[in-house]
Image (cartoon, grey):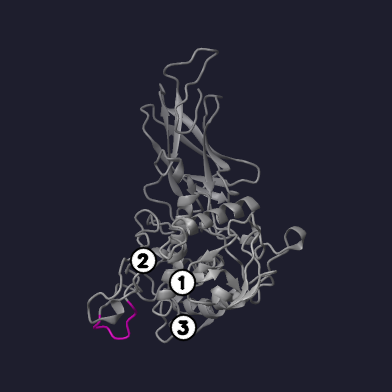
Amino acid sequence: MGVLARVAVAATLLTPVLANAQSIEVEVRNSASADDDYFCWTPVEARVRALNSMQPMQVTIAADAQAGGGGLVFQGLGATRPTAATFQPVQTLSLTLPQDSSWVPFWVAGSAASVGAKDVSIVVTDEANAAPPASLPVMVRVRKDARTLTQPEIDTFLSALRTLHDVDGGVVASRFVKYASAHAQAFNIGIHHATDPGFWPLFLAWHRAFLLSLERELQAIDKRVALPYWRFDQPDPGGIGGAPRIFNRNFMGSISGGALQAGGFRVTFAPTNPLFGWNVPGLGALVRTADATGGTMPANRLQTILDLVENTTGPDQGAYKLLNGRVELRYHNGAHGAVGGWLGQGYSPADPLFFLLHANTDRAWAVWQHANPDRFVSTLPKSYHAQGAYPGPAQPGRFRMGSYLDDVMWPWSGLQGDQGTPDRLDDWPSLPEPFPATLVDGVTPSPKSTVDYLDVLGAGTALDACYDDLAYPH
């Protein structure tokens, strides 16, 4: 019996081809498309079936990875979606496939990250037959420490970024420039200043959705892309020839040899780097004031912040309300300031380094959540303090519309300009280029949708974004 994923391949006996040969099909996300065979640590549904079988078929499901490639684990399909409490993965899974060709579902999740490609396969073997197994290549796609990326992974990321930048000829309404425009216009009306009186809640939640929007656009260009993160609390170690790994002309660029100009030094890139000649309308060539090769703060800064949040006395002990402000002020701000130039301005997303910086900032929130698993429960005030929906103008001291747990956040809400009411807190800026209405299928960008990013509660709302050092808790 010969088998191949999705394609029923006739098995041969000596030289004749059997017209009704048995075969096996396996799919991820209940789809025959190869475009959705990418996932990270969160379990995703898969299915397998036998074709042309004269009797039930007992099969074993396992992983087969290229050297150094990704890893997979499996679980049979229970009555409900796996949660952190119920996920009990195994290396191999035995299933019985009916002879009527009906699908048998199971769960698959990543256990080790792929290296820039579909380098691990779901393998299904007929236990009663020694024929070649069915094999479906997949990629365990996770966000990695930028210092650990291979050059092919770097090139894949940068090429997609350049394509997004150039897709509309670099005009102001382009799909990349809208990120700088949105951030600049909303900077002082809700997405920052988390330590201001009232503790505005959006900083971490809004930026998590912001990163995902950019990442989804990059993945539409190249499915292999995941945003790397810059550990700005650690040194950028020497690479080949002792050169920094990130602040390098072959990766995120360097001010070394860059001309002095308004706001700092021009960032230089190797001619072969897709970011070579990076330019944004109205700003010109990319400018920074420093290469932060030595790190921008003590290595224990994040742990110090987490300890302060947990050891505070009073009702806000261990609460997002405190974490949100402290991560912004004492962790994130120092990295922006250390690099300077465009990163020191409201339009900082015009510098691609912004997204690596904020991926690490988002990772800080994720580290806190993993240390406190109940912080994945969005309806707990300690997980997000602006509960419910926008209360309207009758509520004094309220946050802006789009800040509450159940609100759709701007700019994904589509709100543009004055909403025509006397309430000034339901207004948001207008943008020439719209943002997508969802982050993944069926997930609208609300603060609630950003909290349980791994879907550890089993609601089916995973954001398909994972960090290499933060596994699915179980």
Residue at image position (60%, 66%) is 230
Residue holding disc 2: 432
* Along the viewing direction, whichever of 293 and 349 lies nearer the viewer: 349
Residue holding disc 3: 195
Three-letter amino acid code at the position of disc 1: Leu
User: Which element carries disc 2, helix, strand or loop?
Assistant: loop
Secondary structure predominantly adopted by residues drawn in magenta: loop
* Along the viewing direction, whichever of 14 and 370 lies nearer the viewer: 14
- Nearer to us of marks 1 and 2 is 2
Task: Decide: is 325 above or below 12.
Answer: below
Residue holding disc 1: 204
Three-letter amino acid code at the position of disc 3: Thr
Horizontal side of residue 299 vs 8, given as left or right:
right
For residue 405, which quarter of the picture?
A: bottom left
Percent of width and height locating residue 69: 61, 45
Work out how far the residue at label 3 is from the one at label 2, CA to CA, in angstroms: 31 Å
Whether 399 is among the magenta residues is yes
Mark 3 near mark 2, Cβ–Cβ under 8 Å? no
